[in-house]
Image (tube, grey):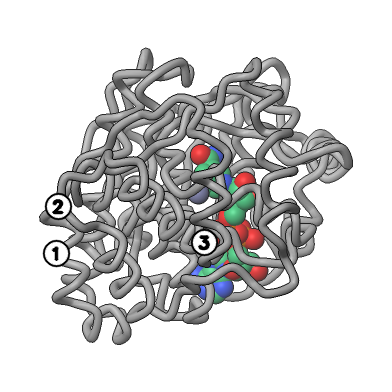
Amino acid sequence: LRVETAEPYEILIEGGLLTELPEDLPRVINTRKLALITDETVKELITEDLARILEEAGFETKVFSFPAGEASKRMETVVELARSMVRAGFDRKCVVLGVGGGVVGDMAGFLASIYMRGVPYIQVPTTLLAQVDSSVGGKTGVDLPEGKNLLGTFYQPKRVYIDYGVLASLPWEQFRNGLAEVVKYGCIWDRRLFEFLENRSQLLFLYDPDTLEHIICESCRIKAEVVSQDEREAGLRRVLNFGHTLGHALEAALDYEILHGEAVSVGMVAAARLSEALGVAEEPVAERIEALLERLGLPVRFPKEVSAEKLLRFLASDKKVWHGRLTMVLLKRIGEFAFYENPPVEKIMEVLEKL
Ligand code: NAD
Ligand code: ZN
C-alpha cells in the first residue's frame, strides 16, 4: 500500500513479515547501522528476536528501550534515548527503527526527526492501534504535563512494516482498543468494512489471520486516502475525529484512566445518536453501531461517575482550541459522514443524559 504524502512511502502488510526485513530494508535505506527503539515489554517479546535476525544478516544493531506505557512518552525519555545513541556512536548515517505500539511509534518518529537534524525512520507497529492508526499520517510527538501530544513534528517514515503475526501476544483489551478505530473507519468511510466487522466478530476474537489482514489493509487504505488529501489537518482529516470529540472529553474527565478506544467507542455511540437527533442521519445508525461495539466488548455507555455537565465542560475547552467553533463529525448513514458546525448544546445535553 502506497501513502501519497509529499514524501510517499509504502506500508507492507503480511503475517510473518518481520523475517523479511533484512532483505527488504536495503531497498529504502543505504546504511546498515540501526537504532532499534522499543519499550521493555515489546523488547522481550519481539525486538530482541528482530535484532538477532538483522545482526545475522549483517546489520549493526543496538536496542534502546524504556518502560512501557504512556507515562514514558515525554521529552525526558527522548533526551535519554538520544544521549544513549550518541554514547553508542550513532552518527548522522544511522537509521531509527521504532518497534512497538503508538507510544514507541510517536516517540521514535519524533527522535528520528530531530536526531542530528533528522535521520531516516522505519516503523514496525506492534499493537492493532498502531497498525491501523499511527502507521499512517506522519504525526510524531510527546506529551507535556499540560497535555497530550503538545510537542511534535510531522515526519514520514521511509517504510512501515506491519506484521500482524506479532498481535498474537497482544492482550484482548489492547486489541479491542484498536478495533474501535477500525469501527470508526467503517462508520465514516466504508459501509462494507463495517459489515465485514459485523459478520466476522467470531473470527476477530480468534485473531484469525485473513480477518486481521483485511481490517488492517482496509484501515490503512482509508486513513491514507484521507491523509493524502489533507496532510496537515486543515479540513478533511477532521473526519478521523468521529467519536473523538466526546471521546476526548471523556478521557480528560476521567484523567486518562480509560483506554482511548473505550472512550472513542462511547463517543461514537453519542455522535451517532446526535446524528439522529439533529436529523442528519438518513437511516438509523446508532443502534447498529452500538450493537457492533457491544459485540466487540467495547463500552457503549458513559461511566456513571461522569456527569453530562462535566463532559460539556471538557467539550467547551476543546472548542476554545478550535477558535470558538466546534465542528462535529456526524453520520448521514453507515459509511458516510457529515460535518456539523456548533451543534446546539441542548441537543448534546439530551443525548449525553440518555447515555
Ligand atoms: P502503547 O504503545 O503503550 O502499547 C500498549 C501496550 O501494549 C504497551 O504496554 C506495550 O508494551 C504493549 N504491546 C505492544 N505491542 C505488543 C505485542 N505485540 N504484544 C504484547 N504487548 C504489546 O499504546 P498504543 O495503544 O499502541 O498507542 C497509544 C499511543 O499512540 C498514544 O500515545 C497515542 O497518542 C498514540 N497515537 C498516535 C497516532 C499518530 O497518528 N501518530 C495515532 C493514534 C495514536
Ligand atoms: Zn483515536
Judge left or right: residue 153 versus residue 195.
right
Label 3 beta carbon within 8 A of ligand 2: yes
Relative side of 257 to 59, left or right: right
Disc 1 from disc 3: Cα separation: 19 Å
> What residue do we see at 53% from left, 46% from top?
348
Which of 328 and 170 lies nearest the eye of the viewer? 328
- Asked if the residues shown at circle 1 and circle 2 are in contact, with their CB atoms under 8 angstroms apart, the answer is yes
Mark 3, secondary structure of its residue: helix
Give the vertical position of 28 relative to 349 (above or below).
above
Q: Residue at x 51, y 34 (%)?
A: 344
Q: Residues within 10 Å of mark 1 (few under 14, many from 20)?
A: some
Which callout, 2 or 3, points at the residue further toward the start of the chain? 2
The part of the image, by quadrant, that contains residue 231 is top left
Measured as percent of width and height from the top left, residue 145 is found at 88, 42
* Residue annotated with mark 1: 195
Residue holding disc 2? 191
| Label 1 vs 3, first from the N-terminus | 1
